[in-house]
Image (cartoon, grey):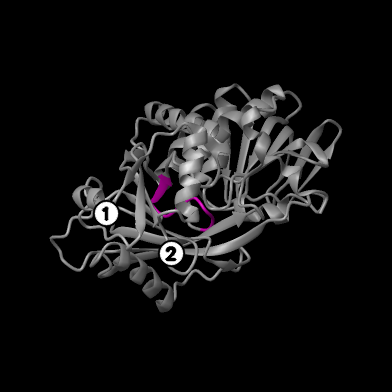
Amino acid sequence: MRPGGGYDAAVVGLGVTGAAITWFLARRGARTLALDRHRPPHSQGSSHGRTRIIRKAYFESPDYGPLLERAYAGWGAVEREAGVRLFHRTGALTVGRDGGELIERVRRSSREAGVPIRALDPGDLSSLYPALRLEKGWTGILDSEAGVLRAEESVEAFLALAGREGAHLRYEEGMSRWEETGGEVRIETPRGRYSARSVVLSPGPWLPSLAGPKLHLPLQVTREVAAWFRPVHRTMDLGPGRLPVVLQERLREGVGYIVPDFGEGIRVGFHHDGEPTDPDRTAREVKAREVEALRAFLNRAVPDAGGRLVDHSVCLYTSTPDHHFAVGPHPRASRITVVSACSGHGFKFAPALGELVADRVIEGAEPSELAPFAVDRFGPG
């Protein structure tokens, strides 16, 4: 703590992004307090579920290109510093109707961001990935630099590094309220009171309740389901090398994803398919119909992959109306930085956001990479 008992910075919420911000602040010499209402890594928010996809052929928008370059470099640095392997390169295949919205968005975004991609016709696909089945009239686009990050291990690595740098990590201690006053921010928790020059709010699905009524950031929290299956045939190999990450257009609407088997079963889920929920009242049990919908999607893309159910999980998405991030100063509190690296695709950006948010907190910088994601872009509400 700095003289007088306060901190230079406090981070509220220690999912992967909050954990990364904590590390970058602490390694820059900031006396840093980090709070989480649970004990991370935990399964109550958005940074769990064993694996997360990282890719450069980004259908969401070319605006993420600079952040992705920084993120890839950042994950390498985290691995070296922590002495653990977090990234596994598998390639990612985006599959959809030739000329359809998903494929065209990947092409356009990759072209504008300068990301090399490879178009695969059915013959190419059957040669490279014989387990996959392509719908008639569909095509695939391969991002060979994509892969998978280990989810819980990533959170653990960031927090271990932050603790090594002297950050004060306080688990099972959530923030009750904050107040900006007298050149600092005062924080109250059920266990005590703290003060800091700057506060970063990165609590994921709890942001709407913690940011205060003057934020006017329209966020929606949804409940999303993933499941892990073993293939019908025991000899069927669906591990990395035999199967890439797959992002596939669904016949009805939306996008589904498939992650190859890292020894835990092949993972499948739907992107932005869940119903609105309260993070403190979310139904954690998974219904049989939800499992069967995932199994049917998987078996259509990879026949006989959806055999025995191994496990299932509930994750929370915290989404803006345009499904892009909201990162920057609180419009009504200059010492508060809001970080909602959300909408179901923020995990991979953690080291990039950690570095850039630390720059903002310590130096007052407003990084150009974050300009498209201004917190106040939705107006006064």
For the image, the number of numbered tags is 2
Closest to the observer: 321 or 57?
Answer: 57
Taking the spot 36% from the left edge, 58% from the top edge, the residue there is: 138
The quadrant where residue 372 appears: top right
Is residue 373 visible in this depiction of the protein?
yes
- Magenta stretch in the rendered image: 44-53
Kind of residue at badge 2: Arg
Closest to the observer: 267 or 163?
Answer: 267
The quadrant where residue 143 appears: top left
- The relative height of residue 186 versus residue 363 in the rendered view (above or below) is below
Image quadrant containing the N terminus: top right
Taking the spot 47% from the left edge, 56% from the top edge, the residue there is: 100
Is residue 351 visible in this depiction of the protein?
no
In x, y percent, where is residue 339?
A: 65, 42
**Residue ID for mark 1:** 122
Taking the spot 20% from the left edge, 68% from the top edge, the residue there is: 232
Magenta-drawn stretch contains 2: no
